[in-house]
Image (cartoon, helix red, strand yellow):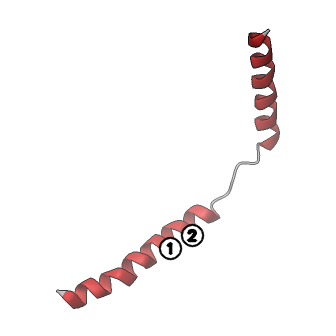
Amino acid sequence: MTPLTWLLIPLATLFMASVWGVLAGRPRRADDVAGVERYDRFRAALARAAS
């Protein structure tokens, strides 16, 4: 059983690295402008609520 445990450690590491690689390499949405506009609207709403 002990040799199987030692074999499981690198296999689990390989699996986790593969998952991380897929997630890190996925395409990102390029909606930075929309995010900034939403933040500006949020700030304006808070300014109106505080007044």
Q: Categorize mark 2 by other alpha carbons within 10 Å: few (<14), some (14-19), many (20+).
A: few
**51 lies left or right of 26:** right
Q: Residue at x 57, y 69 (%)?
A: 21
- Asked which secondary structure carries label 2, the reply is helix
Residue 21: which disc?
Answer: 2
- Mark 2–mark 1 CB contact (< 8 Å): yes
Residue type at tag 1: Ala
Which quadrant of the figure has residue 41?
top right
**In the picture provided, is 26 more to the left or to the right than 31?**
left
Nearest to the observer: residue 51 or residue 14? 51
- The residues tagged by marks 2 and 1 sit, at their Cα atoms, a distance apart of 6 Å
Can you name the residue that lies furthest to the front here?
Answer: 50
For image coordinates 79% across by 43% down, the residue present is 32
Which quarter of the rendered picture does the C terminus lie within? top right
Q: What x and y, as percent, mark residue 30?
A: 76, 48
Helix, strand or loop under label 1: helix
The residue carrying mark 1 is 17
For residue 50, the mark is none
Q: Residue 46's x, y, as percent?
A: 75, 18
Q: Quadrant of the N terminus?
A: bottom left
Q: What's the residue at 45%, 78% (across, down)?
A: 14
Pinpoint residue 9: horizontal percent, then vertical percent. Answer: 35, 81
The single residue placed furthest to the top in the displayed view is 51
Residue at image coords 31%, 81% = 8
Q: On screen, 34 above or below 21?
A: above
**In this picture, is 26 found above or below 40?**
below
Q: Residues within 10 Å of mark 1 (few under 14, many from 20)?
A: few
Does residue 2 sit above or below 51 in this rendering?
below
Give the image quarter of residue 42: top right
Dividing the picture into quarters, in which one does residue 44 lie?
A: top right
Pick out the residue farthest to the bottom. Answer: 3
